[in-house]
Image (cartoon, grey):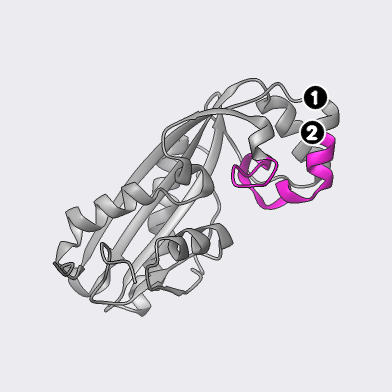
Amino acid sequence: MNPLLQLSCPLLLASQSPRRRALLDRIDVSFEVLVSPADETLETSAAPAEAVRILARRKARPVAAGRPSALVLAADTVVAHDGEILNKPEDSSHARTMLRRLRDTAHAVYTGLSLMHAGSDRTATAVEATDVVLAPLSDAEIQAYVASGSPMDKAGSYGIQDHTAPFFVERIEGDYYNVVGLPLRRLYRMLHSSFADLLETPSA
């Protein structure tokens, strides 16, 4: 149990993302997974930051309504290039097209976070942004990465946590964990600023 982050109520992760589960496991926080039934269709007219904010709140709402005594965490992450949201690839060809677009350029990764406690009628929502630059990948490198199958369930067709990432991520500016899918520092700050009464005081 993390001595810096202990909750006096259940924490529910309203997400089926294995990466978000792994990050919460990494910081040794007790939680349950309860996948949200909410529609995850993006707001096509919304800017990327606003889109992830809307979706995070939408995902949290039905889970919080069903478990009012728990604190619900929901998140949504997108990759945006020149202001356009790049979703998960539809197939291998689509993944190759996205990676060719992103190579040797900067793009932004946005994650919307929503914490909701229905029992006290409180919600806190925030957005974290991280800039990422991919290396000037060759077509052969892109083909090999796509052939591994790794890009197929990831926004923007790549995962910074993949074992090949050191070869093709040139640099990042901002929170690495945000690019993985859950900005842990932002989450920690939100808990302390909006739900401090649900946190147990660390032992001296």
| Residue 188 sits in quarter | bottom left
Residue 19: within the magenta?
A: no
In the displayed structure, 128 sits above or below 16; it is above
Q: Is residue 3 left or right of residue 201?
A: right
Quadrant holding the N terminus: bottom left
Query: Residue visible at 86% across and 30% down?
Result: 140
Q: Circles 2 and 1: CB distance less than 8 Å?
A: yes
* Magenta-highlighted residues: 142-164
Query: Which amino acid type is shown beneath numbered disc 2?
Result: Ile
Percent position of residue 32, x then y: 43, 75
- The one nearer the camera, 101 or 186, is 186
Residue 34 badge: none
The number of numbered badges drawn on the structure is 2
Q: Residue furthest front?
A: 204
- The one nearer the camera, 114 or 151, is 151
Q: Is residue 184 left or right of residue 104?
A: left
Percent position of residue 203, x then y: 16, 70
- The one nearer the camera, 184 or 33, is 184
Measure how far apart labels 2 and 1 are at the Cα level: 6 Å
Query: Residue visible at 56% across and 38% down?
Result: 79
- Mark 1 secondary-structure assignment: loop
Percent position of residue 4, x then y: 25, 62
- Mark 2 secondary-structure assignment: helix
Query: Which amino acid type is shown beneath numbered disc 1?
Result: Ser
In the displayed structure, 199 sits above or below 127; it is below
Query: Residue visible at 63% across and 44% down?
Result: 159
Query: Residue visible at 42% across and 36% down?
Result: 129
Q: Which residue is mark 2?
A: 142
Residue 138 badge: 1
